[in-house]
Amino acid sequence: MIKAILRFFRNLLILIVVLALAAVIGLWVMINKTAYAPEERETIETSGRSENVISPEASLTVLTWNIGNGSSGSDADCFLDGGTNVVTTTEDRVKENTAEIIARLQEYNPQIMLLQQVDFNSTRSFYYDESAAISSAFEETESSYAIDQKAHLVPWPWPMIGKIKGGSLTLSRINQKDAERIALSVTVKKPDNLFSVRPCMVVTRYPIYGVEQELVVINVRLISYENPEDIRNQMTALHEFMKAEYDKGNFVIAGGDFYQSFATEETNFPAVEGRWQPDKVASDLFEEGWRVVSGNGGIATQRSLNLPLKEGTQDQIQYYVTDGFITSPNVNVDSVETKDLQFVSSDHNPVVIRITLK
């Protein structure tokens, strides 16, 4: 009788181990088969419609803002940045952050909005469709959305990161000709490459009334993991693309989160021990006449997420100037301003540039 009972439990244990192993193998196969692998160049479908067309020598306002997936407001800290939390906020706060972001965009009312880290269907943002919420808040606008991170399941740490689907959104109140996603290189080893950000340029083209030239606007979020040359390579690719468009006679502007410091003496925030320190923006890649700019006035465009903002002091939270713009020589920069929103709804502040086409 005892032998039979022991045999039963032995077989039960073997069955449990086999089923667990099969589940792990099945999960690994699923993750590999569904890993995000975008093409080098992909056409983006444009949603919405605007009848506004740019005129020659027009003045335009362009905004760039990394909205932090709607889950990186003042209450957030993240384990990836030295914090403790995987789930960085609540579902209600994600919706509150998104509503605040929309309100600010409506207040500033730029012609073109370049937004990064906009979640579409992610566990971290409680599956709230931020792209749809933001796009639907503006009438007579056109939007182009490109995914830069997608995974059905990120099974680490605990609680799990879960599902990720996010990217960059370009929203404009002027008529777009077309939009395209162009991949940028990044070095990532397995298994991290199954879940990591795939950086890209979101390129939108705008016809200009009465002339052959176009306004080419590039929405970027650069990223680096293991190879310090990744950012340099991404900036080189960005430079080559922008220069090729400028050589055609087009007006070119790139805006976004450059993962590099635009800091000047006025905006050079003290280094906090243990926090990431970006390299200076690779402006040397661009010839004379090109502008590489961010806001001034001593206002940071990004904060570290090692602590919730209210719990951190000046010597604990790192502040940066990592968001800005690059413009071609035929684009006049009239003004650049960082909006000081106190990092309430995102770990980045928006930067607004006013340009005139020469």
Image (cartoon, rainbow, N blue to C red):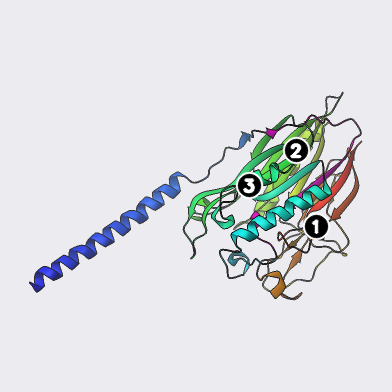
Along the viewing direction, whichever of 317 and 71 lies nearer the viewer: 71
> Of callouts 3 and 2, which one flags the residue occurring earlier in the amino acid sequence?
2
The residue labelled by disc 1 is 262
Numbered circles on residues, count: 3
Q: Secondary structure at mark 3?
A: strand
- Seen at 75% across and 33% down, the residue is 205
Q: Residue 139 bears which disc, if any?
A: 2
C-alpha gap between disc 3 and disc 2 = 22 Å
Vertically, is 117 above or below 208?
below
Mark 2 and mark 1 lie on one chain; the one further toward the N terminus is 2
Figure quadrant of residue 347: bottom right
Q: Secondary structure at mark 2?
A: loop
- Within 10 Å of the Cα at label 1, are there few (<14), some (14-19), or many (20+) other Cα atoms? many
Distance between the Cα atoms at labels 1 and 3?
23 Å
- The percent position of residue 272, horizontal first and vertical second, equals 73, 73
Instruction: Nearest to the eye among marks 3 and 2: give it.
Output: 2
Percent x, y of residue 282: 77, 53
Answer yes or no: is residue 35 visible.
yes
Residue 251 locus on image (x, y percent): 83, 35
